[in-house]
Amino acid sequence: MSDDAGPLAVTLFSELLTADQLLRNRLTKVLPKGMEISHFSVLNHLAFVADERTPAQLAKVFHVTRGAMTNTLSRLEWAGYIHIRPDWDDARRKMVSISPAGKRAREQAISAIAPVINRVVSDVGTDKVRSVTPVLRDLRRRLESLD
C-alpha cells in the first residue's frame, strides 16, 4: 500500500458516507407519506425480480438482520403493499410478493424521487456518472465479498 493510500481510503469512504446520508435525507423528504427508504427498497426489489422471496432471502439481499427485515415486511403488509403467505412445501417458511397496491406505491415513490436524482445526475454530468458507476459497483462487490 502506498503512503497516500490510507488517507485516500479515509477520504473516499468519508465522501461515500456523507453522500449516502445526504441522499437518504433528501429522498426521505420526498417519498410518499409513511414510506421509508427501506420500504421503497423492498418494493423496488420485489417488482424487479417479479417473483416471491422468503424473508431470509430479502434480509440477505439488503444486508440486514432477519428481525429488521421482519419489521419492514410487517409494515409493508400492514399498508397492503405486500402479500405474505406460507410456503406450501415448508410451512415453517413464508413467501413474500408485491401486491398491486405495492406496485402503485412503488411507482408513486419513483415519481417522487426521480426529479431529485435526475437533477443530481444532470448537475454532475452524465459522463461523470457513467465513469464513476463501474468504480462504485466494484467497491460494492468487494465490500459484499468481505461478509
Image: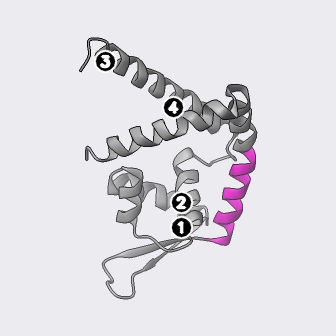
Secondary structure of residue under mark 1: helix
Residue ID for mark 3? 5
Label 4 neighbourhood size at 10 Å, few (<14), some (14-19), many (20+)? few
Q: Which residues are magenta?
A: 99-112
Q: Of circles 3 and 1, which is in front?
A: 3
Separation of marks 4 and 3 at Cα, in angstroms: 22 Å
Secondary structure of residue under mark 4: helix
Separation of marks 2 and 3 at Cα, in angstroms: 35 Å
Q: Is residue 34 above or below residue 8?
A: below
Task: Compare marks 3 and 1 and give the one earlier in the sequence.
Answer: 3
Residue ID for mark 4? 20
Report the residue at 58% width, 52% height from top: 40
Report the residue at 61% width, 49% height from top: 35
Question: Is the image coloured rainbow, by chain, by secondary structure, or in one colour?
Answer: one colour
Residue ID for mark 2? 45
Q: Quadrant of residue 108?
A: bottom right
Q: Amino acid at mark 2?
A: His
Decide: marks 2, 3 in contact (CB < 8 A)? no
Secondary structure of residue under mark 2: helix
Residue ID for mark 1? 49
Q: Quadrant of residue 86?
A: bottom left
Separation of marks 4 and 2 at Cα, in angstroms: 19 Å
Decide: marks 2, 1 in contact (CB < 8 A)? yes
